[in-house]
Image (tube, helix red, strand yellow):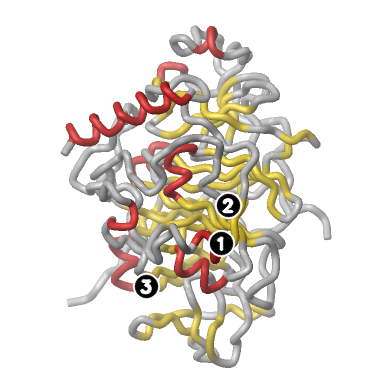
Amino acid sequence: MRMIIWASLALVTLLLSACAAVLPATRAEPGVVATATAPAPASGPALLPAETPPSGAAREFKTDFSRHTVPYADILSGGPPKNGIPAIDSPQFVTVAEANSWLKDVEPVILVQANGPSTSFRTGDARAYPLQILMWHEIVNDSVGGVPLVVTFCPLCNTAIAFERTLDGRVLDFGTSGRLRFSNLIMYDRQTESWWQQAGGDAIAGELAGRQLAFYPATIISWAEFREAHGDGKVLSRETGYTRDYGRNPYVGYDDVNRPPFLYQGPPTPGKLPPMARVLTVNLNSEAAAYPYSVLESVRVVNDVVGGRPVAVFWSGGVVSALDNGTIALGRDVGAAAAFSPKLDGRRLTFRADGERIVDAETGSEWDILGRAVKGELAGRQLAPVVSVNHFWFSWAAFKPETRVYRVFTSD
């Protein structure tokens, strides 16, 4: 199986080389309820002493490598060079009806919606970014509801993350650096050529080293769920300006939980979970929590408190892994998870699983994976999303080793 992965990644490199992505609230970190957000102040992690930049970087980039917040020894080449995996800078969109001709119900898409929570189902600019496209581009520079965003996906870490890309009043455009840190995508902005860690949205080298992008809610759900909820939404088109085999997975078998992560050189992974275990992560008020998919599949609902704030985590099946089968739509079902604030109209709701349904104890209303009440007294209401990110355990733990892993304890 490892030979298959190596061969697949080599093929990707070959293809890419031949074809060469109210008042404002404080900065949103992973786990903050979706509200208006502002960039972090200029102060941040301390700069490290000057050292030799990563091999070949000075030839490719105009980055000020004298400024960095991480050791350059942590950074590896991912294979393709700068922009070898091309970001999508002028995304085109098609209707749900058009996309339905090439997207299967169970395929994973990244949902990004403007305007935050609403009391009705179809308000705000809702967009779907299929992983069958992001797999080959990793970065989309876009604007959603008038907000400049960068929508990103790192296949090696299974991280789909959106950020606001305005910093100090300037809109940044992002591309791929061709480098990895702890197997995670390192982006760069084209305005200053500073390097940014995708997992945390923080600049790790260059003029902007130490700065932080604001997280924006983004959730991996099935195409069927997006289509049902946002029939008037927009879908990223496969007309990207590049020739790629969209729908095919070049990382066949990569997410086998019994395999080690590819190109990982970093801190030892805490043994709380297998390195390739899927987790949904929330980070609030300096507390980080990880919810293993293996647990979520059995309980379907979690009522928790992270950093002093109540959080509800929902899980549903019907979403395949983009990193399993050679054809994405034929991957195994891994489900989807999302986090929400359980507070509605000042009242904290408590959720439970009722067979395949998610209901609240207070009114008996039924809820879906998008945090929408679909039946009952609260039908039509919407929970506010909490920024949460899918990771493989090794990827999250490399950056947040102190994370609390949610477990279910049963009495004999």
Question: The disc labelled 3 sits on which kind of residue?
Answer: Arg
Residue, disc 1: 308
Residue 162: x %, y % from top left:
58, 47
Residue, disc 2: 285
In this rendered view, identify the residue nearer to me: 12 or 299.
12
Question: The disc labelled 2 sits on which kind of residue?
Answer: Asn
Question: The disc labelled 1 sits on which kind of residue?
Answer: Gly
Mark 3 vs mark 2: which is more N-terminal? 2
Residue occupying image coordinates x 33% and y 44%: 249
Residue, disc 3: 300
Residue 315 appears in the figure? yes
Residue 65: x %, y % from top left:
58, 13
Mark 2 vs mark 1: which is more N-terminal? 2
Quarter residue 169 falls in: top right
Q: Is residue 81 left or right of residue 241?
A: left
SS for tag 1? loop
Number of residues whose C-alpha sits closer than 10 Å to that of mark 3, classed few (under 14), some (14–19) or many (20 or more): many
Q: Is residue 142 left or right of residue 293?
A: right
Residue occupying image coordinates x 29% and y 26%: 10
Q: Is residue 245 left or right of residue 165?
A: left
